[in-house]
Image (cartoon, coloured by chain):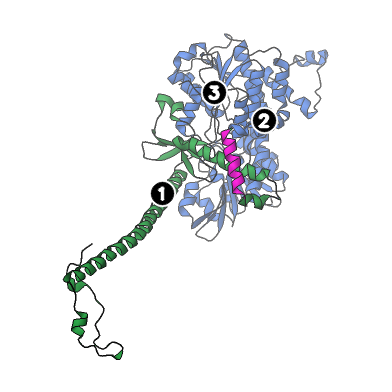
């Protein structure tokens, strides 16, 4: 931020030689700065205030900017995942894909990528095509990379537990169950501990 | 790593598969009879059978017959699309190593066959049960070291039998082979009676067309054509036959069918069925003359009987009404409905052969395996037909279920005819 060093940059309130209709005897004397320091002080104050305002605005803006960046990142991730999911769904495949099954992606010499239920381990050294990776098809038609399957299972387990708990509450308690999050969380943590 | 215990699409389908298998068992009396007769004796004990044949519900009943007879069995499918995943799952669940799923790639197909060669104890196969010859070829070319212990192979189909004859001529065949395909109870039943039921099933499922009153052309009056013509006539269609062989043409005429050429019949007919085994039976020339919404399908083994390529190239547009049913709009404005893309209509649009008729074929397979295994050394290397006696045994095994009561020859009658009371009843040349 550039500091306003020029004293004239300090905006003082306009002078009035006849305030409220009364003619001042000597407006110059009345308005004369007692010390040149005063102006500097003022200027500093203004400039400091400026900095604070800017800083404050900056803080707020940067928060928003961060959020935008985060959202953009999220959006990019969603789009990328959607594209990956779509790509995997569109890879050549002779079988009807079934959620819960792990599929392995291979690439033929022709460049064609295809999904197979045979893993590279099952193929062994005889594997005829380049192995690209393995994913599990989820029930929402998304794909989980093999290395993340365990984490995803944990998440699913949590969801299942919450759902089971909701169901256990019975139909009449359903709506109160929805808002009674505390009870759920307690139940969950208790279960996890045990 | 060691091979997986089994590889199927979805093991959770096993329960459903089991129900389907139980249902099929009741429709496969031949196999069940063989279980009753040979099961307690465990005649196949010691046999390690590698099988390569469509992994369907009917095949599941075959596999369980073989295991009940004491054999160890490992299975793969002989077609990348023909596996019924629930049947495969049910078999895998019983502990029989099966490597088959609907929609294999060609490479996976060979991987599957490969897995069936060496058994759990590390010993290789000593029997082959094949359909189409791929397993036979694989062992002969890639694993010749196993051949010395293989007592024999049985082959299910025409293609495979041709392959065996070729191998034999070149001196490449190294084990005794049984031609199951040409048993009377196989080819005369599955071609004729199988197609007689499944052709119309396919046409009906695909189009729901009324057959009564329609004119249908059946090209080719072999076993398949005979079955098709009979079925169409039974529904009230007026059937026209085309033939190149004067004997078959005369047969058709004697049955009361009009026999003429496709060129003559083409404008008159509403439904076209090809069952010749020949190429280019229905051509562009024919398509241009057909009536609006003529139904065209093939039930011969190969897909070259109908010039589908011509249709694709010369139509104004093509509409897929549902899988396996395409409606072409011709430039003339007329339409042609093609079923199963010119491939086997009973497989593409229906469920193929019913269990009962497969019981005939598979009973032949089981008897062929028993012959080759128990009479090791009696069959020289070569392609053998199943004996008339066994052929008759297969038929006999199906009679009870149908409530058929067989008449027995008295010893005097037997003497008069010169035929043993227990058969065989016909000489090899008899045509049935």
Residue B400 placement, left or right of B428: right
Q: Position of residue B121 (x, y in %)?
A: 53, 13
Q: Is residue B7 visible?
A: yes
- Quick one: which chain is blue? B
Nearer to me, B78 or A100: A100
Say which mark, if any, is on residue B5: 3
Circle 2 sits on which residue?
B18
**CB within 8 Å, label 2 to label 1:** no
Which residue carries the number 1 mark? A77
Q: Give the structural element (helix, strand or loop) at label 3.
A: loop
Q: Is residue A124 left or right of residue A187?
A: left
The magenta segment is: A180-193
Mark whose residue sits in front, 3 or 2? 3
Q: Of label 3 and label 2, which has the lower sequence position?
A: 3
Q: CA distance from mark 1 to mark 3?
A: 39 Å
Q: Chain of mark 3?
A: B
> Residue A78, percent across and down?
43, 50
A191 inside magenta stretch = yes
């Amino acid at each position: 931020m550039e500091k306003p060093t020029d004293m004239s940059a300090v905006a003082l309130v306009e002078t009035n030689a006849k305030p409220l209709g009364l003619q001042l005897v000597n407006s110059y004397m009345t308005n004369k700065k007692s010390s040149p320091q005063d102006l500097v002080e003022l200027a500093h104050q203004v400039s400091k205030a400026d900095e604070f305002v800017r800083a404050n605005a900056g803080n707020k803006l940067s928060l928003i900017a961060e959020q935008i960046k985060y959202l953009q990142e999220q959006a990019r991730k969603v789009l990328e995942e959607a594209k990956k999911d779509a790509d995997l769904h569109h890879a050549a495949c002779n079988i009807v894909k079934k959620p819960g099954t792990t599929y392995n992606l291979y690439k033929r010499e022709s460049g064609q990528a295809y999904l197979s239920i045979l893993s590279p381990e099952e193929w062994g050294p005889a594997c005829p095509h380049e192995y690209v990776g393995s994913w599990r098809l989820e029930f929402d038609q998304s794909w989980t990379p093999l290395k993340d399957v365990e984490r995803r299972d944990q998440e699913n387990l949590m969801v299942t537990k919450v759902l089971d708990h909701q169901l256990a509450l019975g139909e009449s308690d359903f709506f109160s169950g929805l808002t009674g999050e505390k009870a759920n969380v307690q139940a969950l943590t208790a279960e996890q501990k045990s | 790593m060691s091979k997986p215990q089994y590889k199927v699409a979805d093991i959770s389908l096993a329960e459903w598969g089991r129900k389907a298998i139980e249902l099929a068992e009741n429709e496969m009396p031949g196999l069940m009879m063989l279980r009753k007769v040979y099961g307690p004796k465990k005649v196949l004990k010691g046999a390690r059978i590698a099988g390569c044949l469509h992994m369907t519900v009917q095949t599941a009943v075959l596999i369980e017959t073989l295991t009940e007879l004491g054999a160890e069995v490992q299975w793969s499918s002989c077609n990348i699309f023909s596996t019924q995943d629930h049947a495969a799952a049910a078999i895998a669940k019983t502990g029989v190593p099966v490597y088959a799923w609907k929609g294999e790639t060609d490479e996976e197909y060979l991987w599957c066959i490969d897995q069936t060669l060496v058994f759990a104890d590390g010993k290789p196969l000593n029997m082959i049960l094949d359909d189409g010859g791929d397993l036979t070829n694989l062992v002969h070319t890639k694993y010749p070291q196993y051949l010395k212990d293989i007592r024999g192979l049985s082959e299910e189909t025409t293609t495979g039998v041709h392959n065996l004859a070729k191998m034999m001529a070149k001196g490449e065949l190294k084990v005794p082979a049984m031609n199951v395909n040409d048993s009377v109870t196989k080819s005369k039943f599955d071609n004729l009676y199988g197609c007689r039921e499944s052709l119309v099933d396919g046409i009906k499922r695909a189009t729901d067309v009324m057959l009564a009153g329609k004119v249908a052309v059946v090209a080719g009056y072999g076993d398949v054509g005979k079955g098709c013509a009979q079925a169409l006539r039974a529904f009230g269609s007026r059937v026209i036959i085309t033939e190149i062989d004067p004997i078959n043409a005369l047969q058709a005429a004697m049955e009361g069918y009009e026999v003429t050429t496709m060129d003559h019949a083409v404008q008159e007919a509403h439904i076209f069925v090809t069952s010749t085994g020949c190429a280019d039976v229905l051509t562009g020339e024919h398509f241009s003359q057909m009536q609006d919404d003529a139904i065209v399908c093939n039930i011969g083994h190969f897909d070259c009987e109908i010039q589908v390529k011509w249709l694709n190239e010369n139509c104004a547009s093509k509409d897929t009404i549902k899988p396996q049913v395409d409606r072409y709009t011709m430039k003339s404005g007329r339409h042609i409905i093609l079923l199963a893309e010119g491939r086997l209509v009973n497989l593409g649009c229906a469920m193929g052969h019913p269990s009962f008729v497969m019981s005939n074929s598979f009973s032949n397979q089981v008897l062929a395996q028993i012959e080759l295994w128990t009479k090791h050394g009696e069959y020289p290397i070569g392609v053998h037909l199943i004996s008339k006696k066994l052929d008759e045994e297969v038929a006999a095994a199906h009679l009870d279920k149908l409530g058929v009561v067989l008449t027995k020859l008295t010893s005097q009658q037997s003497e008069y005819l010169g035929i043993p009371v227990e058969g065989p009843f016909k000489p090899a040349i008899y045509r049935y």
